Amino acid sequence: MQFKLVAVLLSLLVVATAIPLEKRGSKYLAQNSFAVKSPKDGKFKVNDVKYQAKGEVNKDRFKVKDHYPHNKIHDKKSHWHINRDLPSPCSIGTQLFWFFDDSFVYAEDGKFVGAASNSVAIATDVNNPSDITDVSITLEGEVTVAIPWTQSEEEIQYDITARYAFWTYGSCIPIDWHHSWHFWTVVKFYAFEQYETLGYTLAQYEYDETKGSLAISRQEFLYYDQTTYSYGAFASVYVSGVLYLYALDPNSEKYDVHVASVPTATANDKSTWTYWQASTQSWSTDAPNGSVRDEANAAIVGKLPFSTGSVFWSDYHNAFLLVFFSDFADSIFYAITAPTPVGPWDTTPIEIVKTQSGANGYNYGGQATPVFYGADGQIGQRLVLSYTYQDNSSNWFPASDSVVFA
Ligand SMILES: *[C@@H]1O[C@H](CO)[C@@H](O)[C@H](O)[C@H]1NC(C)=O
Ligand SMILES: *[C@@H]1O[C@H](CO)[C@@H](O)[C@H](O)[C@H]1NC(C)=O
């Protein structure tokens, strides 16, 4: 604990002193900008979203009418062989971006081309979200990390005994027509393949479709100090100016989910966060002790343990859904529902669909988005489901399916 605290303080100090002078006083710590060609063959439609249950949740609307396994998420124009982990769906305006964790690029003959702890691509076919155009990995083989480093982080990015990595386990949070936010877990390596989790950083995405630019910035570090739950690391949802940030309680074997909330305007100021107390149905300004189980104050106490998942509003079901994988190595998508972000959650899992798994018998990193493609219908009637498919250590890739509810 002591060591971690010191490490956190030191890294904050390093960051603070490493910001180039010209950036002092500007609104971000670090920023990457990418040119993004607007997909030419159609738009992903997003309806006006109501975010408010009127009457009963439509529990009878989970019967799957169509299931499309789209298979590997990849760029058909790219001749690189790219291993990449944990696809996270991210809708911004009318487009669907994908963010990935560790991305390793090889030539066809197996020669290593480049690697980054995360990467970004854009979906280019409204009928097949697995069909992408890479953004941070070019056809020429340049590999740029999607989530920007500060200068001091960048300097050690190839030092395997000191480098940082940013990995995400949740989908991003659509804020408005041009912006989505996304929580990334910050890890620091101290030896080859050995690392510790320091906390997380909030990445903010701005997509300008007319200019064809995607800017990714970090305003602040948000380190949780392991004395409270890791809010935002599991899932997040935005409703009318407020973020609801979900954390799995590891002390509960991942059965309990706790929720914090904060207005988007002050998200980077942790003193403005409040914490849901289910026992009194109220928000507290005191962060709970993250090292003990507090089942009575959890917003969700699952009937199955959670591993990864996504929370979003579904017009079609007149409810907030948590769509999730249960064990880390799983291949079945389940849903639970609630009329508000804090509940009451009906925790009886509804099985949506079993995705095809490889010889190992499992996939992992399941997430979902209700981004609504071409056809008519309501938000939530069609879901894009994503996960990492893994057969063995040399055969794994990000994949997506979509389902349409009857
Ligand atoms: C949290 O709970 C643990 C275990 O009971 C205890 O040792 C620790 O002091 C508590 N932390 C705080 C800040 O109360
Ligand atoms: C990994 O899985 C693929 C596809 O199932 C198979 O062709 C390959 O031989 C496997 N490799 C190892 C090392 O088992």
Image (cartoon, rainbow, N blue to C red):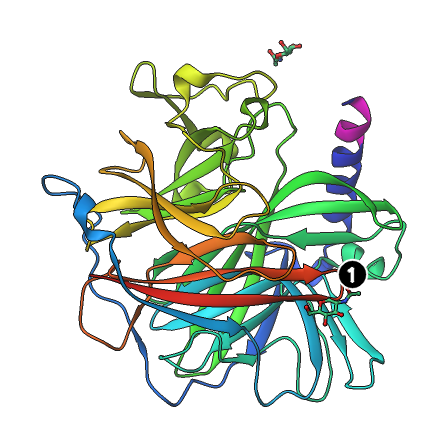
Query: Front-most of 204 and 388?
Result: 388
Vertical placement of residue 11 versus 391, above or below: above
Residue 102 x/y as whole percent: 69, 61
Please give the range of residues in magenta. 2-6
Q: Residues within 10 Å of mark 1 (few under 14, many from 20)?
A: some
Amino acid bearing label 1: Glu
Query: Is residue 3 inside the magenta stretch?
Result: yes
Residue 381 x/y as whole percent: 24, 61
The answer to whether any part of residue 148 appears in the image is no
Give the residue at x 44% y 18%: 295
Q: Secondary structure at mark 1?
A: helix
Query: Front-most of 8 and 65?
Result: 65
Residue 143 x/y as whole percent: 72, 75
Give the residue at x 74% y 75%: 105
Give the residue at x 26% y 68%: 46
Horizontally, is 315 left or right of 107 in the view?
A: left
Query: Which residue position holds label 1?
Result: 154
The answer to whether any part of residue 113 appears in the image is yes
Quadrant assignment for the C terminus? bottom left
Magenta span: predominant SS is helix
Query: Is residue 71 inside the magenta stretch?
Result: no
Query: Front-most of 401 and 139?
Result: 401
Q: Which residue in the rendered view is the most extreme toward the left?
A: 55
Residue 157 x/y as whole percent: 81, 60
Vertical placement of residue 96 versus 220, above or below: below
Q: Is mark 1 within 8 Å of ligand 2?
A: no
Query: Front-most of 201 and 382?
Result: 382
Vertical placement of residue 375 versus 349, above or below: below
Quadrant assignment for the N terminus? top right
Vertical placement of residue 122 versus 78, above or below: above
